[in-house]
Image (cartoon, rainbow, N blue to C red):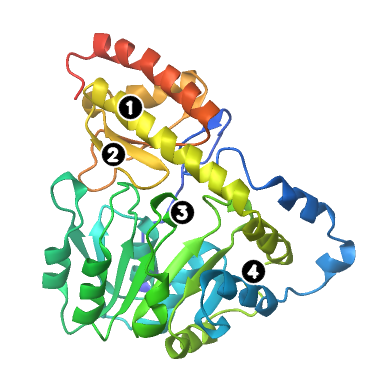
Amino acid sequence: MLSARNVIVALHEYHPPLGDRTGLRLDFNENTVGASPRCLTRLRALTVEDLARYPSREPIEREVASFLGLRPKEVLLTNGVDEGIRLLCETYLEPGDETIIVAPTFAMYEICALARGARVIAVPAEKGFAFPLEGILTAIGPRTRMIAIANPNNPTGTTATEEALLQIANAAPEAALLLDEAYYEFFGETLMSAVPRVPNLFVARTFSKAYGLAGLRVGVLAGPETPMGYVRRACSPYNVNTVALAVLPTALADTEYVDQYVAEVRRGRERLQKVLLERGIQYCPSRANFVLGDFGAVCKELVRSMNRRGILVRDRSSDPDCEGHVRITVGVEAHTDKLLAALRESLPELKSAVEVVR
């Protein structure tokens, strides 16, 4: 009888709570208004002949490399950041190797590492979900072959300093350090320029968030030329589709659109955090396009209450140390207005239903 590998049998399948997502979608950290309108114009210009050809990734990689200030051989376009994570695991992890992650964080680091038969060491975040530098340094051992860090982190929105990240890279020279910068645009700080001079540093970016291209599944993995050469060997030559490759340069070129969106998100993030502070709701100060709030015992009722008002938010209670926490995506000003109005209506209802709202 056909049997899967033991590590796959033991693996928990990742199930994003998709289902019916009608209303204002503030649950998946997506761009709340979509990509630049120029992208739609570019899509309409595609022909049936374009769709009949296999995609050619390299010309667009050259454009993206130039955009990032890197050389083409230091850049690989991927099917979202998820594929970049998987490729690094396939390239650098043997069964029994160790991968270090922060808890809580993006689930795919653990899933991809476990699928390769690696052992995952989850270092708990410090108080207030602060970055656990000393915990990570202590966890590094002779079998450490990968360290995955989201900066800003998801679901907390917290960050690590450049100094701390470079210290980790230096402390584990035989490990691939993956720095996931999916929320870079809302943070504004990056280690991308360090890629050519740090031999074990890989930086991932996505065009799903600020650029609004989540439906096209396109990301980028950057790393030093020689290590990236090995990653390319594990990658399909046609991993990014023709439509995504056609639209990406157009999205990158409309910097005014992205800058405007990011500016609105940053203002909305501060407004949301102010309302939570005024209502006595503890939250994690965020540098991403979302805020994680601790609603305690009324967490699930808050999610339902917001849903009744046409707004989807994400219950993160299943994440380590996140019991009672809700993650709320921030979008453009009009959407933030709607979010805050619904939140102000919901909280009094919840307070009357439950004695204490933390």
The nearer-to-camera label among 1 and 3 is: 3
From this viewpoint, is residue 212 visible?
no
Q: Name the spot of residue 123 as percent of width and height, x first.
A: 18, 61
Are circles 1 and 3 on residues that touch, CB within 8 Å? no
Q: Is residue 80 above or below residue 344?
A: below
Q: Name the spot of residue 66 as percent of width and height, x first.
A: 58, 74
Are circles 2 and 1 on residues that touch, CB within 8 Å? yes
Q: Which residue is mark 1?
A: 300
Q: Which residue is mark 3?
A: 185
Q: Would residue 7 appear left or right of 63 to someone viewing this image?
A: left
Q: Specify the amino acid type for callout 1.
A: Lys
Q: Specify the amino acid type for callout 2.
A: Ser
- What is the distance, in whole Å, between disc 2 and disc 3 at their CAs? 27 Å
Mark 4 element type: loop
The nearer-to-camera label among 2 and 3 is: 3
- Please state which of residues 78 and 332 is positioned toward the viewer in this rendering: 332
Disc 3 crowd, CA 10 A, few/some/many (<14, 14-19, 20+)? many
